[in-house]
Image (spheres, rainbow, N blue to C red):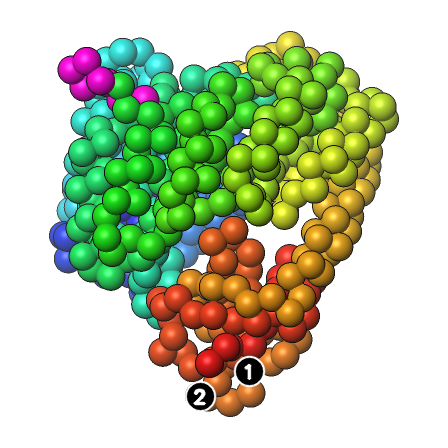
Amino acid sequence: MNKLDSSLVTAALAERGFVLTDKATEADAVLINTCSVREHAEDRVLSHLGHLRHLKKTQPQLVVAVIGCMAQRMGETLLAHEAVDVVAGPGQLHEVPELIDKAMADHQKRMHVLDNIRQPAASEAIRDISERLDAFELAYDSDANHIKSQAFIRAMRGCNNFCSYCIVPYVRGPEVSRAPQAIVEQAKKLAGEGIRQITLLGQTINAYRYTAGDRTYTLADLLEQVSAIDAVRWVRFITSHPGQFDPSILQVMADLPKVCPYLHIPAQSGSDRILRAMNRGYTAEGYIELIEKARATVPELALAGDFIVGFPGETDEDYEATAALIRRVRYKNCFVFKYSPRPGTHAEKKLADDVPAEVKQERNAKLLEIISEIADQDNQTFLGRTLEVLVEGPSKKPHLNKAENEDNPQLVGRTKHDYIVVFNGPESLTGQFVKVRVTKTAALTLFAELVA
Ligand code: 5AD
Ligand code: SF4
């Protein structure tokens, strides 16, 4: 979601004549788009600001903007920082170019952050921005060297779930779904420009709902409409919440070949006690039933998840329940996070952060080991198989079978199940769908050769 926001702001700035530069020393303005999900992410921003404060001593004209969730969470504090000129929350991203222009002209500090982001008026403001900013076609992606063949489209903003540990509902505000026509129009335009894979984004994408007249559109409807666009080959969506996961989504996945058989569906924990304290709204058994149903409906469904270790009160037994759930589900890959208390959340206010740092670290490492062992075993079943991949471009960190020569560098692609495949081939294949045969497997990567 943050990557998309950065691209949208970049596109809005480009419209005003700004161009990207890699070096702060060459820049007129530095923007930091921020994440508040864990303390570590915020600490890194503060350390960047320290560097920028130094830089400003030799470059006094430099304008520094802090945008996104951290701006929303701690606006005044950031504005008071010596290095900062502009502070803009996730609901004000459309105003960023104007704020930068003004700051470049007069070097006054300015802050634009929605006061009551969860009030109905704020929802309306956010809906408005959704349309002004989200409709930008993304001519910019994070790596300009890659031919663009895929794009993200925001389907909805915000979250209403209030998981007890999570800052998102407070900084990104309430759920607001975009109109299906706007999303489909955008997808059509992008497809016309050569985009072949579209990923629909939302914090809880399965909660997508849009009512127009007497009809309510759901995620299943949206997937159907986007996959009806001829030039679009693959459609994905992230992230799903396991509570109230409508079976119609699985049916669409099974019926429509363009809808990729991949679900990122975080369980967070395998202990019912912890799940309740997290306010997740399901039990471990309920989660597993959903996964079994999903696998029965969608052949070769690939699953990914998130887990938090060291949530307040997590015992060895709770941790073991999480490990057991992982062993039952057998994910393709998972992200594991150490619990980080976020100011203002229920967990931070009411529950002591009582799992020692070493225990969090140990559980984190052990879970990753289990996840990797499972993926390593399951990936071996791909050996010798021919798979279709969408080529993303040259590998940024060449793996074992290194690039042989200029005409045959190591390329990275992804299957529709989101498996990462590495193989050698001409760079001109970037953005195309090709067939590859798997010659070697590892926990996170499949190695392959091009099939003529
Ligand atoms: N501490 C640690 N991890 C967190 N996440 C969300 N909030 C926290 C927190 N306070 C994790 C969840 C979520 C992912 C994006 O970040 O696993 O799915
Ligand atoms: Fe945070 Fe829970 Fe919403 Fe995900 S569903 S963004 S974890 S509150």
Label 2 sits on a secondary structure element that is loop
Report the residue at 55% width, 67% height from top: 386
Question: Over which residues does the magenta segment extend?
Answer: 209-215
Foreground: 360 or 369? 369
Amino acid type of the residue tagged 2 in the rendering: Asp
Residue sitting farthest toward the right: 316
The one nearer the camera, 401 or 215, is 215
Count neighbours of disc 1 (C-alpha within 10 A) and say few if under 14, some if 14 to 19, many if 20 or more. some
Residue at x 74%, y 49% (from the top left corner)? 374
Label of residue 407 in the image: 2
Give the percent coordinates (x, y) of residue 29: 29, 52
Residue 406 shows in the view: yes
Q: Which residue is drawn at 46% across and 88% down?
A: 406
Q: Position of residue 57 (x, y in %)?
A: 38, 55
Q: What label sits on residue 403 in the rendered view?
A: 1
**In the displayed structure, does residue 320 sit left or right of residue 274?**
right
**Which x, y percent locates residue 82?**
40, 40
Q: Quadrant of residue 27?
A: bottom left
